[in-house]
Every structure is written in C-alpha cells, then in structure tokens.
Image (spheres, helix red, strand yellow):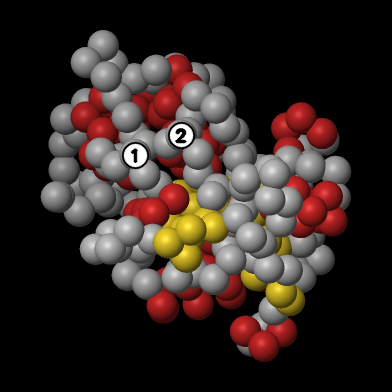
Amino acid sequence: MSSAAYRSCPSPNFGPRPSGVPIDILLLHYTGMSSAQAALDRLCDPEAGVSCHWLIEEDGTVWQLVDEQHRAWHAGVAYWAGETDINSRSIGIELVNPGHEFGYRPFPKAQMQAIATLAREILSRHKIPPHRVLGHSDVAPERKMDPGELFDWAWLAGQGVGIWPSGEMVEPSPGPAEDLRRIGYRVGEEGPDPAVIAAFQRHFLPETLSRVLDAATRLRLALIGNMIPSA
C-alpha cells in the first residue's frame, strides 16, 4: 500500500515535539471501542484530548490523524527505559479491535499486513531501533493491556518490525529483575510488579499470562534481555 492510498481524518489533538528529543519509539495500541468510526470520532474530539498518528481498520484501511512531526496524545502516564514523556519520542498506531472489555479477538490478516507495511515505512523515516517497537501495555503495565496477547508480535518481527527471540541464550542472565530493566520496564528495588511481568508475557510469551516469574518466563526474559544493546 502506498502512502497515497492512506485516508486522512485530521485530529486537532496534538502539540509540538520538544526540541532535541528523538523519535525512537513506535507504540502500538488497540482502540478498545465498538467500531472504527467510534474510535475515529473519539480520537478527533477536542474534548476527549486523545489522538494517535495512525489508525488501522480490521480490513486494512489506514487512516492518518496526526502528522508524524507533531506530538500526538496516545501514551498517557507511561515509562520506558528511564523516560516518562513517551508521547514526545514516539509514533502511535491504533489498531481497531474491541479490546478486552468489549470482545477481544484476533487481529485479521489484512490488518496485520497493513501494520507491517506502515511500520516499515515509519522505521524508514525515523531511527527507531527494533527493540523499541512496543505495545501500550509495555509502557503502562498497571493501566493497559493493549494490543494484548492475541497480537502476533512474532509474525511482525518476521516482517522486519520489532524483535522476537531465536536460537539459544549466548550469555548468562543477570536475573529476571535486571533483564526486565535492561529491556526497558520499570522495576523497583523490591522487584518486578506482577503487572510488569504480565506485560512482558503479553508481548513475548503470549501462551501464558501467569503474572509470575516461572521457568518459561525467566528463560524468555533472558533471551530478550540478550537482544537489547548495552547503553
């Protein structure tokens, strides 16, 4: 799909990006609403005070709401790798899906293909590292579950967007708490919150949502941690 095929639904909900802050995160959401039109209406409502740069319908139709040069309002209270103003450094994509509250369901092939195409275009425009292609639940685990465990992160990584583990661990793991911190999650001195563990599982181990550091989660954590470049 070429950029000429994208539809426009301008949202008034945006502001300037601060000078000197790089665009280095691609953040994926689901709409969590009854329909694409309901989501578009809300994201373009000045009183709602929320927006995103792009929205993708289940049939693969792509809408642009905010120009990427502007700061859209999609992340809310969030944290990643020491940063808390995620809106200023990210591009936000909303995927039409009812979400966990209204009948969560798999993301159709047409929608997945559209996000892969759009995301590759975004990554060609901005220096976003593969390990900083994230879900809303990654940066706001206490509040959000999207895009959730039915989103096919492994397939998307195979399309050149994001990361997914392959092979075996080549370096010893320092431990799950440090692995989570290295990946980017907020972990306090008391150790990882169950919500943070669940967010990691939704993204990288969707077959389990145990919210505990079981053996499978520890292994997957170590594998992903080894894929993150040292600061």
Numbered disc total = 2
Q: Amino acid at mark 1?
A: Thr
Residue at the limit of the structure toward the front, as seen here: 47
Q: For the residue labelled by badge 2, is the local secondary structure a helix, a strand or a loop?
A: loop
Q: Residue furthest top?
A: 190
Q: Are marks 2 and 1 in contact (CB under 8 Å)?
A: yes
Q: Looking at the image, is mark 2 or mark 1 earlier in the sequence?
A: 2
Specify few, some or many for label 2: CA neighbours under 10 Å numbering under 14, 14-19, or 20 or more: few
Q: Where is 125 relative to 166, above or below?
A: below
Q: Is residue 199 above or below residue 63?
A: above
Image coordinates of residue 212 in percent, x first then y, are 44, 17
- The residue nearer to you, when weighing 53 against 176, is 53
Residue 172 falls in image quadrant = top left
Which residue is pictured at 16% across the width and 43% down the height?
A: 171
202 horizontally vs 151: left or right: left
- The answer to whether residue 11 is visible is yes
Describe the element under mark 1 as helix, strand or loop: loop
**Foreground pick, 102 / 214:** 102
Residue at 59%, 33% in the rendered image: 145
Q: Amino acid at mark 2?
A: Val
Q: Which residue is mark 2?
A: 77
Q: Position of residue 50 (x, y in %)?
A: 62, 47
Cα separation between marks 2 and 1: 7 Å
Q: Quadrant of residue 2?
A: bottom right
Horizontal arrangement in the rendering, residue 188 relative to residue 29 (left or right): left
Per the image, the residue denoted by label 1 is: 84
